[in-house]
Image: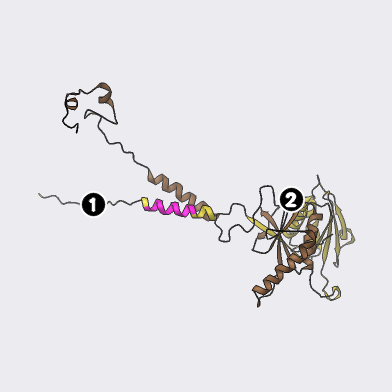
Amino acid sequence: MATKKNKDLDFTIDLIPVISLMSVCICFLLLTAVWVRIGSVNVKQAVGGQPASETAKKPTVWVNINGNGDTTFDVRDARIPARLAKLSVKGVEGKPDHAKIKTLIQDLRATEPNLATALIQPEAQAVYENIIDLMDLFKAQGVIDLGVSPL
Amino acid sequence: MLKNSVVKTNSLPTVLGATSIIGPTTDENKRKITSEMMLTSLIDAFSILMVFLLFNFSSAGDLLSVGKDMQLPKASGAELERNPVVKFDNGKYFIEATEVTPDGLVQALLDLRKQYQETRPGEEFPGILTVQADRRVKFEQLSSIVQASAHAGYGEIKFAVVMN
């Protein structure tokens, strides 16, 4: 009895072109990869010719920070209790006390939900990193309009 | 030439020659010197490497060149965009890699603004500036940048940070 010849269904994939393609892709991606993600903290400042009297008054917190990380908060044009109007937070090891400042901002926002503007007035010896940390804390709590006052 | 030489036909297989793999003189150890490469694992490694590099791919490339001594502050910031860069490094001020004096900052920024308005006549000047400085710098050194940008009409400053 003649046996049926089974068709050979196996086939081979040539992997060499795949490896060549991958090598080229990897070389290209290695050159274009960005290893450190750099972002930005945005602040605005007044440059227009509009007089201050014509500018709409919004609740604003004025923050002073010195070289030791001590911060002073002064809330203006807002309906908040006197106990929250002017507050100070002492720095910890030369840096602002993040936990206390975060709680303070939360309290201020809870009392005055329209509070979305902060103006930071750093002193000459204030460290740049501490100023950025302060701005980051404000942004995280919803105070998105930030300004930095020059000396 | 030595195919039919007396030496070749009369040489007896030595012990070393018989056991040699490279130049065997007997049929016993004659085998091909080929090795098989495992391409599957190589392709697996390449695939993982490609996926990792694809995640780190950026069409904009590096927008800022950060020196090895400079440490940017850390924050959860927004994505950085391409804007004029003012850098404070080692006590010197640089605008787009050109060194300027503290007194010349305003004029340099005004020149940059004028250049923008000349090359893009129909467009509104965005007035955005990127500031790059080391995290340990005191604010008194950055104050001149903030002041000069206000004088030159740059209403928005973006402080470059390393994203958390």
Left or right: residue A30 compared with residue B9:
right
Is A19 placed above or below B122 here? above
- Any idea which chain is the yellow one in this picture? A
Alpha carbon of mark 2 to alpha carbon of mark 1: how far?
A: 73 Å
In the rendered image, residue A24 lying in the magenta stretch gets the answer: yes
Asked if disc 2 and disc 1 are in contact, CB closer than 8 Å, the reply is no
Q: What residue type is disc 2 on?
A: Asn
Task: Farthest residue to the left: give it.
Answer: A1
Identify the residue under disc 2.
B90
Q: What residue type is disc 1 on?
A: Asp
Q: Colour of chain B?
A: brown
Foreground residue among B35 and A102: B35
As helix, strand or loop, the secondary structure at mark 2 comes to loop
Identify the residue under disc 1.
A8
Q: Position of residue B104 (x, y in %)?
A: 77, 62
Same chain for labels 2 and 1? Say yes or no.
Answer: no
Q: Please identify the quarter of the rendering in which residue A55 is found.
A: bottom right
Is B68 placed above or below B30 here? below
* Quarter of the image with the C terminus of chain A in it: bottom right
Foreground residue among B11 and B149: B11
In the rendered image, residue A112 lying in the magenta stretch gets the answer: no
Residue at image location 36% in from the left, 50% down from the top: A16
Q: Nearer the viewer, mark 2 or mark 1?
A: 2
Type of secondary structure dominating the magenta stretch: helix
Q: Position of residue B71 (x, y in %)?
A: 69, 49
Magenta region: A17-27
Left or right: residue B159 compared with residue A111:
left
